[in-house]
Image (cartoon, rainbow, N blue to C red):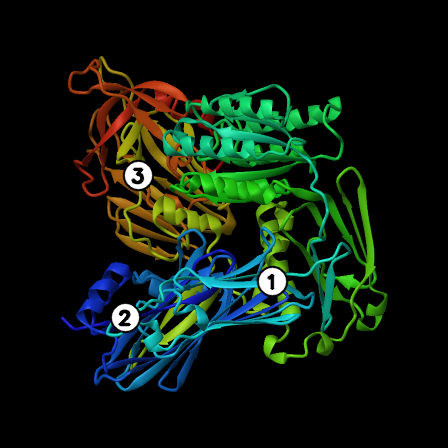
Amino acid sequence: MSTGWIFCVFVCICFSSGSFESLVISKGHEQWVGDTSMTRLLKKRSVSSPEIEVQSIKVDCKVTSRFAHTVMTTKALNKANVSQEVSFEVELPKTSFITNFSMEIDGKTFTGVVKEKEKAKQQYQKAVSSGQTAGLVKASGRKMEKFSVNVNVAADSSVIFVLTYEELLKRQFGKYELMIRVKPKQLVQHFEIVADIFEPQGIAFVDAYGTFITNELLPLVEKTVTDKKAHVSFSPTMDQQRKCTECDGTLIDGDFFIKYDVNRAQDIGDIQIVNGYFVHFFAPANFPRVPKMVVFVIDNSYSMVGNKMSQTKEALGTILGDLPEDDYFAIIVFSTTFVVWRPYLSKATPENVKEAQEYVKTIEVIGGTELHDAVIHGVNMLYEEQRNGTAPKNMVQMIILLTDGEPNTYPRTLPEIQESIRHAIDGNITLFSLAFGKDANYGFLDTLSKQNNGLVRRIYEDSDAPLQLKGFYEEVSSPLLSDVHFRYPDNAVNSLTKSHFKQLFNGSEIMVAGQLNDLNEIDNFAIEVSAQGFQNNVELKGQANTQKWETIFPGEEYIFGDFTERLWAYMTIQELLDTKDKGTPEEKGNATEKALHLSLKYNFVTPLTSMVVTKPEDETKNDTFIADKLTEEERGNVQKYGYTGIAYSYPKYTAPTYYVDGDPHFIIELPDQNDALCFNIDDKPGTIFNLVRDSLTGIVVNGQTIGDKKVIPGSTMHTYFGRFGIVHEKFGIRLMVSTKEIVVSEKGKRAKFFWTDTATVKGPNMDLHVIKDRSLTVTLRNSVKFLIILHKVWQKHPYHQDYLGFYTLDSHLFSSNVHGMLGQFYHGLQFEVSETFPGRDPNKPDAMMLVKGQELIVTRGWQKDFRQDVKNGENVPCWFIHNNGTGLLDGVHTDYIVSGLFKTI
């Protein structure tokens, strides 16, 4: 076995998110990944090997008016007489946009190109079909994304990796924060962190420190602060990095923080105009907080059992204790139904708070997740308080919703729940959501919150969950202004970012950016800010600062080009991506188009674009990889399913399978719980059931039942699925599969196939693979895959006839809106089973199951999975739910009957 080397460095990160960069070098085919491997490898070989030389590692951060531009550069030389593979890994903040990546190998540079995501996927389709992993970016931890690429470096050659990303720093708790995670794991020849900050408003303070900084290293943290500039650097020599004089181990192992704030005045804020673009920063000092009315809507469904409920109760008790006495509050807990602590809002007096805290201690878990009615009741409580006039006027109204699962979708679908709540709130109340744990439907809560002027925060199932909950509440607990409006001269500006904000919270900041129509008119650039403050309206008026840029920024070393224009583009793209998630279909389409255009224009890797990186594989060929930007929902899928949710990166896990086969038996595999559920559907032959419908992807699957040729004397009629209809509305695809033939139509073109031949058909948006008299695999382009199995019966059989089985192989690629008789289970299900007791069949014990807020008597049995053995099948142990799945299905089985094979109603 050959020997390898690892060199791990770091990255500069904005906000309080961590970072990590590594350079992995291996000889031959051996690769080492992860901290454990690093430890083993470093014991085998010291960093001082003459064959590999890391010549420099540098992170250069420039922050100009809150906009951070980071360049990470690593240079290594292969001094060996054989080629070696180098893997470069960097952890980035999830809120950043990659803007450039390049590799210089022995004097030749390979640069990444930003393209529309769909075009990038097409370019990489050949590699995907061969089973290679396309994604260079994966979720990493709570706030990070890991960028990684490996490359083969020839003997006596060098490699230089350069990665650039940009991010807008947000003010939280009265400060901005840069966090630099420093974990080189070894001694590095030239190791340097440099951060330059320029703020025209003036810098109020700068703090710089590290978790690993010893008394010996403290003098190496150099900080220079003048009126508007700050310079921070840290550059220890190899000897200064050592744990001891004779050691190869490094002291540099932890987080390096830079925190700062700017000077502020109680006026219209600071406006900076550069090259036809402006940005307006608004965070006035010394405004008193506005009292609030807050309704806590807390999920106590059975899935909250254990730590989640105890941690929620702990955090809520602390939050209640911190309520100012002039606030009003209410508590609603919901499961299958909701319960209100008091039927009205209570003032946060010590007596009321103590009673509420005692009530919180008594909350127990039970039932399902009837989110809709609980939130609507909270809205009505706030409106009733307004009508009665029992609380002071001008209070900020908010709902804080915490849930850990999928809301019940009967009788309403998820979009119907969102629309009902949005209609009730009507822009008057802010809704914040806390998605607790990996099973929470983040996408649903994100849209729901955005539609109602709020935001969603993921709460991770960890020992610090109470601190996460309290930290979020502290961010929104002290509103200073509400209904904040910014007005600029109508004829002077265009392309404004958001200019109306529901609240301004203490310690935060509002930013508005836009373009100027005429640079010659900036002397008359008047600005008005109106808002509702504590017991009075606030009206601020002022004039923009029209100083020339050369005067404001005399030190060009602090500037990284057209930063104001790029800041505007960054803000605009972020807002368009929000609109894409919450607007009308027309608004969503327009927002997507505009966001894509700006992403390509400014070379940002966003959820709509990808960076295509071509790297040399050897002397004769190159290899192509893709770097993507993950959405928060895709990040959550890593926790929940072990994949990122990007259709063209092949997951390395065994996906759960959901299928219907036999007469007809529905089987729901739940690998998280190492179990399965099953149920039968009995109805008359010819009935068409909706199995899958996903309004976001446009995919619909329906199945029509058939019966036996005739009933066996003394038995009942058995039914099976004899036809399936699959629709992909986006591509105009209709596929009909029966026991006799396969008919596909796409945008007016029609083709027919038969089970009697093995065939592979590749279309522009769908692939079909038929195995003679056995199975059909349907692959929708960059999307899901279905398997339909043909069960052949002897043609002269007196009672039975051919029938079909339907298997979903990539259920995780459906959106959170997926439903249907089978589709409603695609994103998992929580249930608890009691100890077994004897049932009617001595070989099949019964048990009590708690699922969706109902207690059901279920029976342990098994069904067949025919994917590997069409004739005999493989036994799948499962809990059988009786009476057509009653209690497990949303509603009853007849709710899923539709009028046609390609219909949804």
Q: Vertically, is 742 above or below 361?
A: below
Q: Nearer the viewer, mark 1 or mark 3?
A: 1
Residue positioned most to the right: 524
Which residue is rendered at x = 56% and y = 66% of the image? 68
SS of the residue under disc 1: strand
Q: According to the image, label 2 marks what residue?
A: 244
| Residue 672 - label | 3
Q: Position of residue 204 (x, y in %)?
A: 64, 62
Q: Nearer the viewer, residue 204 or 540?
A: 204
Say which element carries label 2. Answer: loop
Nearest to N terminus: mark 2 or mark 1:
1
**Placement of 408 over or under 478, stated as above or below:** above
425 to the left or right of 784: right
Q: Secondary structure at mark 3?
A: helix
Q: Is residue 194 visible?
A: no
The residue type indicated by label 3 comes to Asp
Identify the residue shown where x is 42% and y is 34%: 311
Outermost residue to the front: 215
Answer with left or right where residue 577 lies relative to residue 13: right
Q: Disc 1 residue type?
A: Phe
User: Could you say where residue 618 lies in the image, as x and y percent from the top left?
Assistant: 29, 79
Q: Judge depth for marks 2 and 3 and give the one in front.
A: 2
Residue at mark 1: 205
